[in-house]
Image (cartoon, coloured by chain):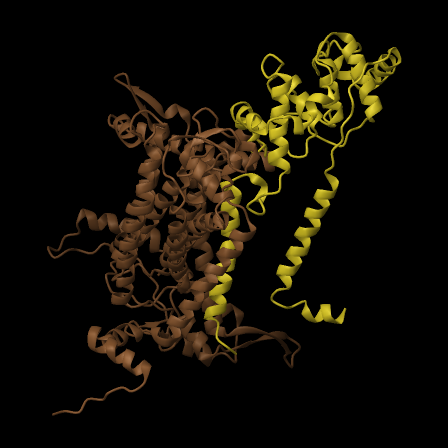
Amino acid sequence: MKLLAERRRHPMALVVLLLVGLLLTGGAYAAFTGTSTANAEEYSASDVEEGEKLFVTNCATCHGMSGEGTENGPGLIGVGAAAVDFQVGTGRMPLQMMGPQAQIKQPQFSEEQTRQMAAYVASLGPGPAVPEDEYLDPSKGDAAAGGGLFRVNCAMCHNVVGAGGALTRGKYAPSLSGVSEKHLYEAMQTGPQNMPIFNDANLTPEQKRDVIAYIKEVTEETEPGGFSLGSIGPVSEGLFIWFFGLAGVIGITMWLSSRSK
Amino acid sequence: MTMTHEPTTAVGKAANFAETRVGASKMVREFGRKIFPSHWSFMLGEVALYTFIILVLTGTFLTFWFKPAMGHAIYEGPYVPLQGVEMSEAFESTLAISFEVRGGLFIRQMHHWAALLFMVAVSVHALRIFFTGAYRRPREINWMVGIALIALGMGAGFTGYSLPDDVLSGNGLRIIDGLLKSIPLVGTYISFFLFGGEFPGVDIISRLYTLHIMIVPALIIAFIAIHLMFVVIHKHTQWPGAGHTNRNVVGEPVLPTFAAKGGGFFFMIFALLGFLSGIFSINAVWAYGPYDPSPVSAGTQPDWYIGWMDGYLRIVPGWLEFYVFGLPLSLNINTALLAALVLFGAMAIWPFFEAWLTKDYREHHILDRPRNNPTRTAVGVAAVVWYAVMWAAASGDLMAVFFHMSLNDMIYIFRIMFFLGPILGFIITKRICLGLQRKDREIVLHGYESGEIIRLPHGEFQERHKPLDPHKLWKLMAYESPRYIPAEPGPDGKISKGEKRRATIAKYFYEDRVAPVTKEELDAAHHDHHALESGSHEAGSRGSIGH
């Protein structure tokens, strides 16, 4: 303790403190961003029944007693199980508050409950189902082909490495890093929020898998060049050189021009 | 027959050889005894020089592997997400430098980080020159050489940024193409001439390459040579201080002190850049993918020094495009060039404008502390704010995402700040400078606050003010404060229109003034220091404002 107290006014103390702080927050961030996957399966009558109960208590205020929609929320007939699995599974639904778009949060329902609600909404009318595992395995996809599709179809909103980007009036395309394969697929399939729908005629399930393979490749690969500074390109690079590069330079100049005491 | 001294040692012989062939002792006498004052802010230009040397070294390395061609290639290298993807040879060779050439990625990152740091150093150096008034006679031309170097640095950076032919740089080139095409009448021709046909063509990379590795660096080297030559001719400026006059330079000689420090400094900058480049990724072209004109990525920005022009394009309203006789006049695009012209033009003419306003055409070798010329400092801050607003506007979309703002609101805010920011910057800075000058006056006249509280016999508490040491006193007293000179009649006895205009502007700029403390004031203050009254010195300092 004495050692620590003695060194607290050391010129490097601030640097060490900063490093410790950054490592702690970075470590905590890494620890709390996990992913999970669930299997698609046939729904039983009891799933639908349980799902209806959950729907009536949690969703009907905005989406109507039988999913027909109200002025506060769209109708859900024909959106399919995939839409429910995405919206509820990522925590976007039930909506935490009104705003330009639904925010991601800790999912409010268990996987079982989500599945039951999906079963109920799927029973309202035919729509896209929760994708099969076959199309969710990035190792079966072609990342290079997916990259080409991603650059042409997705990069203008989500950024070329999936870092996210701004849309008009407070809406935005979220970052794609850490999003599960299933949710990526469902987002393409159902077009949540402001996203366009990429149905199977538009991007085949195999192509969607390629896109997923590309996203996983660019968001999860080890960075060949070192710390990526958020992968948002020249802005973070510029900020970095102005704050840390210039600080380093000025530190050196002050050291060199200081007089020995 | 005269006896000449014949050296016997190896070093002596080598020195003798140099002396008799190129006259080394003369050169050492001329340059080795140049004096450079020592202050950290005088070393920023050096940083620019050293980063430029690092740029040349790393850039030369890159030329050995880079293929400046837009020929068709299919990637078969080790980077999996691009295997089998069609691309240009330029992009393929950039990937090869990054993943296959030993040390290639490190050198590439070092080249890029050095470019960013070069522009930072150049900019901060220019700000130091401006805010200390170092551009005044006789250094006006060197100031303009410096501005040319900033512009050339932007050119070198942009041409280099475009070479890898990735999606990001291609988007940047497309904006340049748009800018060129927006020039009335000749724009389309210029664009077709530069790109060798319709954008993107197949010529642009090799043309940019010639510009980037030959023409622009050659110009930069030439201008650096002129820049340094002027520093030798004019000698270095110095901060005010005891013994520092307009006719001497107090500091360290080039040989041995300054040269040794400079050499070490170079390697420190090299090490800093080596550290950055080894740890932090920059311009991950493999992630951006090969350019084709269809994709545009969200969050596409240029490198920081081009950002302010990009920002201007982002906030300028679209309705500024008109049709004149059926021909488009794209003021929503081409006024970006105008903004650049305004900024660089204003910088170039400022030294002459200031001299004209203050009628101060004398030589200056002693620097101003920024507070001692409130108007200049305020004008500089206004320009910096204007630049920074445009600069920030270039990343408005990222701010919107990260701070959960509406992108539209961001644009409105920047539009307002584009006009309001510089005005606020000017007023606030000027007031702060005047306030700091008044504080300096207080300290000179009544000493600094010692923190010692004394109790007088009748019970009053007072803080003891202690006199400054002579060096500090000199620093706070010995400066020139520009004053407003009313319109004066010319040789013909009449006040010309131009002179009237000068007086009007000068009055606005220089009317508010805090005069330096005179010797009489100081003596008077010392005289009645024992009967210190807070009221009397308040009046004294206030009386000196507005002269």
**Residue A7's spot in the image, x, y percent?**
68, 69
Task: For residue B439, say whether it is visible.
Answer: no
Q: Based on the displayed image, in which of its 4 quarters is residue A60 positioned?
A: top right
Q: Based on the displayed image, in which of its 4 quarters is residue B209 positioned?
A: top left
Residue at image coords 55%, 29%: A144
Which chain: brown? B
B50 w.r.t. B284: above or below: below
**Front in this rendered view, residue B192 or B13:** B13
Residue at image coords 34%, 73%: B254
Q: Residue furthest top?
A: A125
**Residue A148's spot in the image, x, y percent?**
53, 26
Q: On the picture, is B352 further left or further right than A249? A: left
**Front in this rendered view, residue A227 or B231:** A227
**Residue B262's spot in the image, x, y percent?**
40, 67
**Residue B115's spot in the image, x, y percent?**
42, 49
Quadrant occupied by the N terminus of chain B: bottom left
* Chain A palette colour: yellow
A203 w.r.t. B540: above or below: above
**Front in this rendered view, residue B528 or B249:** B249
